[in-house]
Image (cartoon, rainbow, N blue to C red):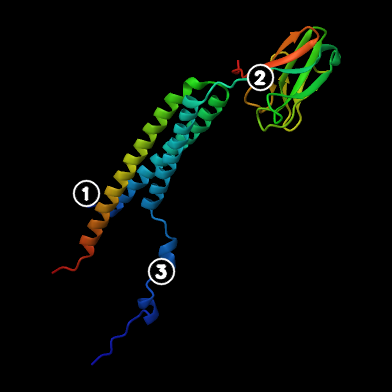
């Protein structure tokens, strides 16, 4: 019950923070993947290049999905805030 | 009649750009930046994939390096192969063995030198060592073996015929 009373904006902010942390984590994995792939390619291990590109693309899609989620939550939170601030007629 | 008193000065109303707001980076903007960076990482991986797919196998010309007796046992002969920009080192560790490698270290391209006392190639920049027999990394930060120049002995002459880029074993 207490959760329902929590302001929408605060809940939205928590969700956005979580998504942001997840995106940052995925980005670190992508950075590591890029450097490891480049290193392997230069060492002559060409068989790793295709799977690495596919995984990197998948990670990007997850990041993009999380960004869309953040946008939606942000828009909802702003709309709720505007509604609260609107003068009572 | 009460006079209406505006708490904000007039110039603030007319000049509606707020420096603090301009500097403020919202979470949504920051997320956008991170996602664009993620796109950049993906583009980097795609670039490596395309380079790998469209790279051609290089063709090396033959090049006479020196006569076998020009290099004493435990001595070296410096030359450039396949182009003038590629310094290489030929080593004669014993009577009948000739090996040649690119002189550029695989870490930061500093020159490597032969140490006959320790029978290894040394890279003084960051204390990396390579095996003379195989070119493999013995110690230090170099991530890959030295590219080996393929040699052929034609009578008294030593000829470079190609470069073998080997995988780390």
Q: Are callouts 3 and 1 both on one chain?
A: no
* Residue at (65% x, 21% y) in the render: B145
Q: Residues within 10 Å of mark 2 (few under 14, many from 20)?
A: few
- Between the C-alphas of marks 3 and 2, the distance is 67 Å
Depth check, front residue: A70 or B162:
B162
Per the image, the residue denoted by label 2 is: B61
- Between the C-alphas of marks 2 and 1, the distance is 77 Å
Depth check, front residue: A78 or B145:
B145
x then y, percent, for residue B103:
72, 26
Foreground disc of the pair 2, 1: 2
Letter of the chain that mark 2 sits on in the rendering: B
Q: Residues within 10 Å of mark 3 (few under 14, many from 20)?
A: few
Depth check, front residue: B99 or A74:
B99
The vertical placement of A10 against B125, above or below, is below
- Residue B144: which quarter of the image? top right
The earlier-in-sequence mark between 3 and 2 is: 3
x then y, percent, for residue B36:
41, 44
x then y, percent, for residue B121:
75, 21
Depth check, front residue: A3 or A50:
A50
Task: Judge from the rendering whether residue A57 lies leftward or rightward of residue B157; answer left or right.
Answer: left
Q: Are callouts 2 and 1 both on one chain?
A: no
Q: Which of the image's four quarters has the C terminus of chain A?
A: bottom left
Per the image, the residue denoted by label 3 is: B18
Which element type, helix, strand or loop, lies under badge 1?
helix
Residue B115 in sight in this render: no
Which element type, helix, strand or loop, lies under badge 2?
loop
Task: Report if the CB atoms under discs 3 and 2 are less than 8 Å apart.
Answer: no
Per the image, the residue denoted by label 1 is: A4
């Amino acid at each position: 019950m207490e959760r329902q009373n929590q302001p929408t904006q605060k809940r939205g902010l928590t969700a956005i923070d979580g998504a942001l942390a997840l995106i940052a984590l995925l980005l670190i994995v992508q950075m590591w993947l890029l450097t490891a792939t480049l290193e392997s390619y230069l060492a002559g291990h060409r068989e790793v290049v295709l799977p690495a590109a596919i995984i990197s693309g998948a990670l990007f899609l997850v990041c993009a999905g999380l960004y869309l989620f953040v946008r939606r939550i942000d828009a909802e939170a702003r709309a709720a805030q505007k509604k609260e601030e609107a003068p009572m007629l | 009649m009460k006079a209406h008193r505006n708490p904000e000065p007039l110039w603030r109303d007319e000049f509606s750009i707020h420096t603090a707001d301009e500097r403020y980076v919202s979470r949504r903007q920051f997320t956008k930046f991170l996602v664009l960076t993620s796109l950049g990482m993906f583009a980097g991986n795609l670039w490596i994939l395309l380079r790998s797919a469209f790279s051609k196998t290089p063709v090396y010309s033959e090049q006479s390096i020196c006569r076998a007796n020009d290099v004493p046992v435990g001595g070296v002969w410096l030359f450039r192969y396949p182009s003038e920009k590629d310094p290489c080192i030929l080593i004669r560790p014993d009577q009948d063995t000739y090996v040649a490698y690119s002189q550029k270290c695989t870490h930061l391209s500093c020159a490597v030198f032969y140490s006959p006392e320790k029978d290894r190639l040394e890279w003084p920049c960051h204390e990396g060592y390579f095996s003379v027999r195989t070119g493999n990394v013995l110690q230090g930060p170099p991530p890959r073996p030295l590219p080996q120049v393929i040699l052929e002995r034609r009578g008294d002459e030593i000829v470079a015929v190609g470069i073998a880029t080997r995988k780390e074993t």
